[in-house]
């Protein structure tokens, strides 16, 4: 898939509002928030990114269970907008796929996206299904790791790869990055460093699930 420049979005006018984030945990939502800011610069400082605390569990659901889960998320997003007294500008949902971006990934993403489209969200809704997991997205920015800890170095075997085809990248980072050992809570720091240094504009390697997510972000109405 060809890459479009960061910020090449066709977007709504800047203005106050909120984007609601739902994910497996706080770390994943912080990574999402950084990527949203990087890829949607039209969302100015007055636009809040607000997290739903409930963990997301959509990828294994089908039929009525999926419909109910999506309606619950949309309802919580609406409630956040009412609480903040601001228009809902977007709903971004993250989940680790724990697998490669092959046929089952496509089927899961298509199924959840279709249900989101039917679910009545009064705003663009994006499903960020990370293959293998969000740490695979971090590996697209290997030069950000030593910015967080100078002793960290991404080895050649993990650099410039199709990171969506790396099994359990979180474990690989924990074993091979260097000292101190990588923890999940380091993920948001790495992504923020990548954004601050402009690395998000030029990923090193590829990951289809990352491309799918950022393409969806940049084509919000």
Image (cartoon, helix red, strand yellow):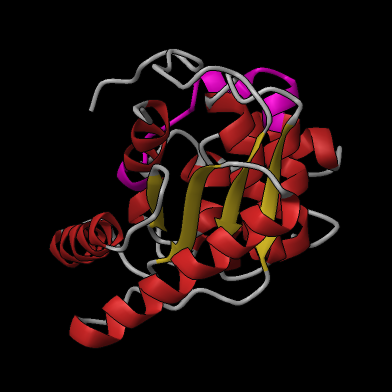
Q: Position of residue 180 (x, y in %)?
A: 85, 58
Answer with the quarter of the image where residue 57 lies: bottom left
Q: Is residue 59 visible?
A: yes
Instruction: Decide which of 131, 220 is in the foreground and name it.
Output: 220
Q: Which residues are magenta?
A: 194-209
Which quadrant: the N terminus? top left
Is residue 198 rendered magenta in the image? yes
Residue at 45% across, 76% down: 72
Answer with the quarter of the image where residue 117 lies: bottom left
Q: Is residue 20 above or below residue 59?
A: above
Residue at 26% across, 21% down: 2
Q: Position of residue 151 (x, y in %)?
A: 84, 43
Q: Is residue 176 visible?
A: no
Q: Is residue 125 above or below residue 140?
A: below
Count of numbered badges drawn on the protein: 0
Residue at 71% across, 64% down: 26
> Which residue of the protein is positioned furthest toward the bottom in this rendering?
65
Q: Position of residue 102 (x, y in %)?
A: 18, 58
In the image: residue 51, left or right of residue 134: right
Answer with the quarter of the image where residue 167 lies: bottom left
Q: Position of residue 173 (x, y in %)?
A: 63, 58
Q: Is residue 72 above or below residue 21?
A: below
Q: Is residue 89 above or below residue 8?
A: below
Instruction: Decide which of 175, 59 is in the foreground and name it.
Output: 59
Which quadrant: the C terminus? top left
């Amino acid at each position: 898939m060809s890459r479009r420049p960061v910020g090449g979005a066709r977007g709504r006018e800047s203005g106050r509002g909120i984007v609601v984030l739902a994910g497996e945990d706080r770390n994943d939502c912080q990574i999402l928030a950084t990527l949203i800011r990087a890829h949607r610069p039209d969302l100015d400082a007055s636009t809040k990114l607000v997290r739903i605390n409930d963990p997301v569990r959509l990828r294994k659901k089908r039929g009525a269970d999926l419909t109910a889960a999506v309606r619950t998320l949309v309802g919580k997003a609406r409630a956040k907008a009412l609480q903040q007294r601001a228009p809902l500008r977007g709903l971004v949902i993250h989940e680790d796929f724990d697998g490669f971006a092959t046929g089952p990934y496509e089927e899961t993403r298509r199924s959840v996206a279709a249900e989101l489209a039917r679910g009545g969200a009064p705003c663009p809704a994006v499903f960020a299904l990370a293959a293998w997991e969000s740490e695979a997205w971090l590996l697209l920015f290997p030069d950000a790791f030593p910015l967080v800890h100078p002793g960290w170095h991404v080895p050649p075997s993990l650099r410039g790869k199709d990171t969506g085809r790396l099994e359990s990248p979180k474990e690989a980072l924990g074993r091979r990055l260097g000292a101190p050992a990588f923890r999940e809570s380091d993920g948001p720091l790495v992504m923020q460093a990548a954004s601050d240094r402009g690395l998000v504009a030029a990923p090193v390697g590829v990951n289809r699930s990352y491309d799918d997510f950022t393409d969806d972000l940049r084509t919000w109405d």
